[in-house]
Amino acid sequence: MAEIIKTALLDRHMKEAFDWSDSDMPVRDALWDYFMEKNGRDTMKTEEDMLPFLKDSDDKIEAFVNENLKK
């Protein structure tokens, strides 16, 4: 029997992860765009801001997205 591996929240489409979203964009890309906009398109700063999300729990990421990206 094959083991089913849960896809990380960052790799799921926004609309799969959040019922309020209809975007096909992966959560990771939505966060990247959010930080790029916030940082005046500074790639280095955005990269720095994204690093914690690679280690954060899905719950933490979900809370951040709900608080900051939900329109």
Image: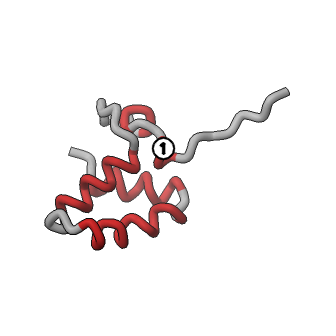
> For the residue marked with disc 1, what is the amino acid?
Asp
The residue closer to the viewer here, 71 or 45, is 45
At 33% from the left and 54% from the top, the residue drawn is 31
**The quarter of the displayed image where residue 34 is located:** bottom left
At 34% from the left and 32% from the top, the residue drawn is 24
In the displayed structure, would residue 68 be above or below residue 46? above
Q: Residue furthest front?
A: 43
Image check: 39 left or right of 30?
Answer: left
Q: Secondary structure at mark 1?
A: helix
- Relative image position of residue 30 (x, y in whole percent): 31, 48
In the displayed structure, would residue 66 be above or below residue 35? above
- Relative image position of residue 32 (x, y in whole percent): 31, 55
The residue closer to the viewer here, 33 or 17, is 33
For label 1, the crowd category at 10 Å Cα-Cα, with few meaning under 14, some 14 to 19 and many 20 or more, is few
At 55% from the left and 46% from the top, the residue drawn is 8
Question: Tag count in the figure?
Answer: 1
- Relative image position of residue 12 (x, y in whole percent): 47, 39
Image check: 25 left or right of 6?
Answer: left
Colour pattern: secondary structure
Which image quarter holds the N terminus?
Answer: top right
Q: Residue furthest right?
A: 1
Image check: 53 left or right of 23?
Answer: right
In the displayed structure, would residue 66 be above or below residue 60? above
Residue under label 1: 11
**The quarter of the displayed image where residue 36 is located:** bottom left
Q: Residue furthest left?
A: 40
The residue closer to the viewer here, 38 or 58, is 38
Image check: 15 left or right of 54?
Answer: left
Which image quarter holds the C terminus?
Answer: top left
In the displayed structure, would residue 51 be above or below residue 61? below
